[in-house]
Image (cartoon, rainbow, N blue to C red):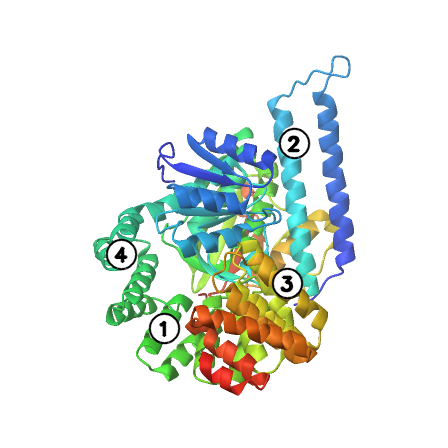
Amino acid sequence: MLRLKLDTKTILIVDDYANMRSILREMLRTLGCQRLIEASTGEEALAILRNRRIDIVVCDYNLGAGLDGQQLLEQARGEGVVGLATVFILVTAENSSEMILGALESLPDEYLAKPFTKDLLNARLQRALARREPLTQVAHALTKQGAPAALIALDKLLAQPSQRRLDLLRIQADLALQCGQLDRAAAACEAALSQRPLAWALVYSGRIAEAKQDFVTADAQYRQAIELTPHFMEAHDRLAALCESREREEEALTLWQQAAQRSPKSVHRQRRLAKLAQKLDRPDLAEPAWQRVQTLAKQMHCLTAADYAGEVETLVALGNLPLAKKRCAELVTHCRRDPLAPWWFVVARLHYVHATANEEERTQVLKLLETQLAQEKPPSELGQALAAALTQLGEHSRASLVV
Amino acid sequence: MKTIDFTTVLAISIHDMKNSLSRVLNALDQIVDPETGDCHCEAPMVAQLQYEASRINDNLIQLLALYRQDQGLYQPNFACVSVHDLLEDGWLSNKPLIDHHEIECTIDCAPELEWSLDRQLISALLDNVITNTVRYTKSLIHLAARLDGELLVISIEDDGPGYPEAMLGHWSLDDGAPLNQRLGRTGVGLHFCAMVATCHANAAQHGQIVLHNKGPSGGGHFAVFLPPLAAG
């Protein structure tokens, strides 16, 4: 087994049980770790990751009420605070947790099933470090100078023989796509696919084809990836988004539904499903998706005024006016920091008054709209939603004003 | 795959776990001096506790997996993994016990060997066989993996007295590895291992386990054969 030194590594332990944190702390101390930091919630861990360099995260899957370990990983990777050189180990309660493993959203370096011995923890740390440490230069270049510089650093690694060649090619494809170097990304995918079929390489190939406006190839690549690895969620999302953008909306709706069923804990997927279902006049499908958006986005602290307005439209379509009214009120109180909240409030209220047909309320919301229009033009992402709600009310001249 | 009578499996496993727990409670009784309340724990006692705890854990993991398979809830998750790492994990998960009994553990596997398999299930199988082997071996456990034609063979060998006659031979669920109730918990273990092997299947063939007594000086030799599978 490789023996990399752990004493210079900064390790973040995340667990909601003080008892488990202290067990992990003792295990890691015995293994020679000296720089240990602890967090008891996903939110606390995220705040630490944003503020300082962490080399290794050892995180429990279950973290109580807020973010779970998987969501923390996704959020932290999304923000770039768990970078290419950071090791993330997810501790799970049971050995065969398809709840976690069933769908591949963002993979940790290692899963560690409780109970485990310190020797096993050490082996997992050593292996993950051996994979991640060579990427330190690439990660550094990426944060300091951006993707093109990271690609140059990565080329040096790819020039040497490595057991982890496929991992490196995957990073190369990703970085090349990020900076629009399509041919380089395609070459990385081809090199990987020449070794064996790989869902990620097929998905990147699909994205490259999409960027080249070759939608037929993209469609085929995504489908091939799904066939090969049904739980590779990015392939489902890409295919559904592609169908939606090519105006095959009924098909896209089915795909979003299937993807959301397979892996329900993704906010963005539930959002896309809810919006498209609403657009295609399927409030029965939209409402459960909005409910999931509420729960998940609250955990992740990313619930927006647009989500509230979307749900209000669905609730109105379902005739659930009391809940629609409640959501309008919540939009105001919960989204104080969302700059678009005043606009989305108008959209939500327009839908609501269309259903109540209350003249007084209608006059009120139209007056509110006038006041806001007098201050600023509606932000572009809202124009269509606003116009649609006005058209529904028969306010055609106002609708043409806001787009 | 054939289904089994899960209630029978449950009863056998509960019986086995109750036995383990009673040994744990007895051991704890001996640790505490009833007069003074002082604790004094010798190394063999710790090893006994570790063994019983591992056995209970193996039992629970098995039960959960068999329950899911019985209910059609388990979706195997095939991914390409390093076989050497898998074997090393099996050793390290049981290292305290192996060290206590002064058993030599060797691993023979090419470091670059990768195979598409359900890591959770194969790990549970290895843990199961290793916990059992630690108990019966004299002085060594040999973990090995190699290619046999287009199959992967993982084997666990020891220099103990070997497996009982009733356990020897080929086992997979399709060949009708029925639950041998007379073997008790061992029968459940075998059935579990056969289930894990069998669910590693491609269009043409599925995995199986084979038990021999061809280890050093007639010791047990457990092998699991896995066909090649597609993985992402």
Please state which amino acid type lies under the numbered disc 1: Arg
Amino acid marked by disc 4 = Gly
Tell me the SS state at disc 2.
helix
Question: In front here: A288 or A402?
Answer: A402
Q: Quadrant of the C terminus of chain A?
A: bottom left
What's the distance in space between the residues labelled 1 and 4, CA to CA? 21 Å
Q: Marks 2 and 3, Cα distance to the nearest angstrom? A: 58 Å
For marks 3 and 1, give the CA distance.
Answer: 41 Å
Instruction: Name the residue: 51% across, 69% down.
Output: A343
Left-right relation of B127 to A176 = right
Q: Which residue is mark 4?
A: A146
| Disc number placed over residue A329 in the picture, else none | 3
Q: Mark 1: which secondary structure?
A: helix
Q: Chain of mark 4?
A: A
- Do marks 2 and 3 both belong to one polypeptide chain? no
Q: Position of residue B161 (x, y in %)?
A: 60, 40
In the picture, the disc for residue B49 is 2
